[in-house]
Image: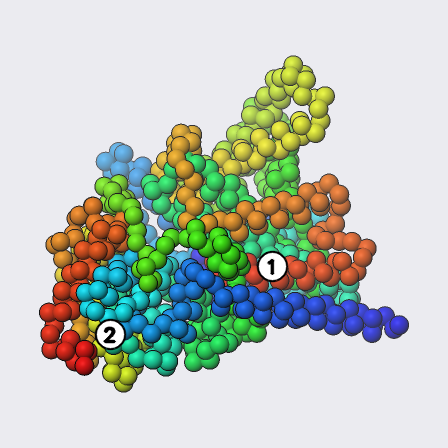
Amino acid sequence: MAFVPIYILILGFTIVIDYFAGIYIEKSVGERRKLYLIFSLFANIGVLAIFKYYNFLNENFSTLLKGFALHNSLPYLNIILPIGLSFHTFQAMSYTIEVYRGNQKAERHFGIYSLYVMFYPQLVAGPIERPQNLLHQFREKYDFEYDRVIDGLKLMLWGLFKKIVIADRLANYVNIIYNNPEQHNGTTFLLATIFFAFQIYCDFSGYSDIAIGVAKIMGFKLMTNFNRPYFAKNISEFWKRWHISLSTWFRDYLYISLGGSRVTIPRWYLNLFLVFLISGLWHGANWTYIIWGALNGFYLVFAIISQGFRNRINKLTGIERLPKLNYLFQVLITFMLTCFAWIFFRANNISDAILIVNKIFLFSGTIYIGDWQKLFYCFAGIIFLITIEIQREFFGDSVLPFKTNNWFKEQMAYATLVILILLFGVFDGGQFIYFQF
Amino acid sequence: MDPKISKALKIVVFIFIIVIADKVLGMILQNFYFKQKSGENHSLNYVFSECNADVLIFGNSRAQHHYDSRIISNGLKMSCYNVGQDGGHSILLSFAQIKIVLERYSPKIIILEFSLSGIGYYSGLYDRLSILLPYYRKYPELRPLIQLKSPFESTKLLSWIYPFNSNLINIIRFNTNYHKERKQDYDGYVPLKGRCTIDMLKSMHQGVAPSIVDNNLVNALENIIYLCKAKGVMLFIVNSPWFTSINERKIPLSTTEKMTLQIINRNQVNHMNFSSDSTFIGHFELFDDLAHLNDDGAKKFSNMLVDSLKSRKTIFQKVEK
């Protein structure tokens, strides 16, 4: 992942292709429309294939040929993955697909279309917008609105807090453990995996909050990308709350195109599984991401298949009569399943992931503490986050935390957030995880 | 009230709250930071403002755990203090420490634990200057060094709290009775009690010496040599033992190693290299891990160092005078 100035040309290439494709799709009828769409999709996916997947596919092709004692003479490309490539490529594709479907008029203004693809708050890590939501906003005029600007700043501050106080703090611990899998035990990996679940949530949702906040200050409304996913009762709900802009992208443009649920039952299961498998591949050219996607697909299909059985178990145990306990149980199971999948997402390679899973199931050894002061900050950050999220999930529905009618109380809360950032933030932390995708 | 004025006032009040809270909390933290009774921060405070030892030992965690101040003090018949700091610190920190100390007094001997590849750039090198942040206001001469950390460092340091970032728990801990629970030190020397195992060796990553020379590290090394000469302090650059010789005995030497040797030779600095000493290589019982001697190893090494220093009679006579 890198920002290489010459790579701006890649962005320019897809912008020009999709800009004209949109116009020609709208102008044309019949098969020609489809042809222009295919051309546009081919160009976008082609860019992704070359920059993101070529070396990965080539490597796997070589391994496959080796099995037949054959040699692969295809060269490896010495290229770096452009920053945020998957995000703006998907946003560009959603434009031509929506024009093709007749849901969006082709944009004639080249500058406005370019802005749609390159809108800087969400260019590198989303939310992946739809043209119906964003394009028209670029034609509107926005005056300075005090409340809107303040709300945007508050959202940015909350995002910054999640990123540098929680995510980057947890990253210090998680990186030590996951980058040395042979040296740590199962109990430590269990803790590191739970930490990673919160790290990736705070890292990515923190970025989304900052992006949405920046756009809001300028008057633009971007779609919500996270909705407290760890309160989900099942995997299906988790994906309605996690990286919503990507989940809905796959739903709208892949799952429905494959026939969605309006097909035979085995085909429906296959559709669900395929969507998650491809979603895994979208994240990166590595088998760890593919397995992560496949696991999520499996969870979803298994949940549907086992629905009746689980209902019977619930009746037998009588847990249905205790809705709060039932809810807590479901949330915990979903969180555990998600954590198990995160092992593959975070591990450096498949063999590391398998080693980590084996160690976790042995559940032995004492937890690696390292600097206990920093471990304390990790726990404190997670507890603080959960407290805020519980408040927002069950006692309020505001986009912003600390929303009250008492102006002074609210200001004090945000001032405290600033102080906490200064006191406990990790100012030497790394990039946002999702920049690499 | 005019809504515009009311809104402007709200912003002013919010900023005012933050500025005041930052200043008040920052000053409280500063006060207690410099009052710590033990711990690494205390060790740094002590050396900067009180220590008058004849022999000072500077360097990273290998300095802290390898040089038993008591043995060196008894052996040389001079007071000794170990200023080594945990956390993979570079020579930039040693330079900062030596600079501040030499402005206050001149010890007779400075021992600098330094690997030959110590002028090579590595990831996170400048992040570790964080340890100097609390001294930004107190020692203005450290500012150019601290500003190497990032281009925005001076802006971040407008805050009074930021210099004490991530230090709150330690400040509380080392100002209360809980400080007694820390690892005990003996004039800065912190003994390690573990034993290196075969598993550690198996999982060792084959380290490659950093190959890119960092000019700031070169300048720091040269400035240390210059400052010691200017103040008449005898400087010994020492590379203490490693479990394996991989880290130090590569043939041919890397660019960074060659350059360090050039600097040492050009300036005629006393250099003592124990990195390949057969007394230590491969001896599990003398190491806590692959990079650190345990207490037994440190005692053995400190005695060897004292003997080696004493054997340099002509040098030593100068110091004793």
Identify residue type, mark 2. Ile
Q: Residue A70 at what x, y percent from top left? A: 25, 38
Label 2: state its secondary structure: strand
Q: Is residue A11 left or right of residue B11?
A: left
Q: Residue A95 at what x, y percent from top left? A: 63, 52
Mark in front: 2 vs 1: 2
Q: Determine which quarter of the picture holds residue B255.
A: bottom left
- Which of B293 and A291 lies nearest the eye of the viewer? B293
Crowd band around label 1 with a 10 angstrom C-alpha radius: few (<14), some (14–19), many (20+): some
Q: Residue at x 60, y 57 (%)?
A: A161
Relative vertical location of residue B40 with respect to residue A252 in this rendering, above or below? below
Identify residue type, mark 1. Leu
CA gap, disc 2 to disc 1? 43 Å
| Circle 2 residue | B109
Chain on which label 1 sits: A
Q: Residue B47 at what x, y percent from top left? A: 38, 71
Chain on which label 2 sits: B
Q: Residue at x 59, y 32 (%)?
A: A332
- Disc number at residue A420? 1
- Which of B182 and B195 lies nearest the eye of the viewer? B182
Q: Residue at x 44, y 73 (%)?
A: B146
Q: Is residue A28 visible?
A: no
